[in-house]
Amino acid sequence: DAMVIQNPRYQVTQFGKPVTLSCSQTLNHNVMYWYQQKSSQAPKLLFHYYDKDFNNEADTPDNFQSRRPNTSFCFLDIRSPGLGDAAMYLCATSRGGGKSTDTQYFGPGTRLTVL
Amino acid sequence: KQEVTQIPAALSVPEGENLVLNCSFTDSAIYNLQWFRQDPGKGLTSLLLIQSSQREQTSGRLNASLDKSSGRSTLYIAASQPGDSATYLCAVRSHNTDKLIFGTGTRLQVFP
């Protein structure tokens, strides 16, 4: 039944050690998003893919990269995690295409801890 | 630049009360507005989506209204229950974008 799946749910990494978070979807949606959410803050969009077109937010640090090898999967790579990157990372999908009925569907998130 | 504000930041009420959560946005050129629920340490669950041409949407005990011209939306929760305790986020999708802009949320606690 799960439509947007994130793995792992909890990730612990060391300062500076690269980490990859995974998101997959069964909705066949065109758009996939990655958000960062720190405690008591709003989700902050890092980047999104419309099909294979990558759209980076202007204030997303270079430390964050993403890959979308196919429609179903999208990865978030953090090249050198710092203590400030500890957060919940949320993946979402939507059909895209400009319809006002378009809803974003969120996964359960990955909680990243940086030691 | 679209900005979304939610008031109050936190709310604590006894079970059974009807309550209103507020969301305001600065740019009225929107496709839609969504209300989400987030339980601690969890992802976001979509509650209601209001298209720009609509004025309200209802789902069970929840009713969301939209006044696009004044840049406001309210989420009304009837007969609140302890299970309603969560953070409620509103998010706006502006024209010509697939992106959502989120408010910082209202943290609701309903006590028995």
Image: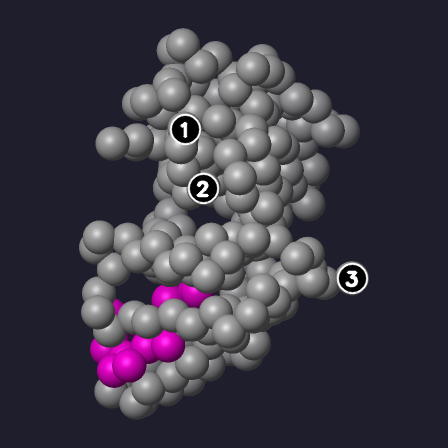
The answer to which image quadrant residue B5 occupies is: top left
Circle 1 Cα neighbour tier, 10 Å, few/some/many (<14 / 14–19 / ≥20): some
Q: Give me the chain letter of mark 3.
A: A
Q: Which residue position holds label 1?
A: B95
Q: Are marks 2 and 1 on the same chain?
A: yes
Q: Which residues are magenta?
A: A77-89
The kind of residue on which mark 2 rests is Asp
Q: Give me the chain letter of mark 1.
A: B
Residue A62 in the image, given as x and y percentages of width and height: 21, 69
- A37 displayed left or right of A60: right
Q: Nearer the viewer, residue B36 or A75?
A: A75
Q: Which residue position holds label 3?
A: A1
Q: Which mark is residue B112?
A: none
Q: Nearer the viewer, residue B38 or B34?
A: B34
Whether pointer 2 and pointer 3 mark residues with C-beta atoms closer than 8 Å, the reply is: no
Q: In the rendered view, how is the structure colored?
A: one colour
- Given this view, does label 2 or label 3 mark the residue nearer the observer? 2
Q: Which mark is residue B98?
A: 2
The kind of residue on which mark 3 rests is Asp
Q: Residue at x 44, y 14 (%)?
A: B68
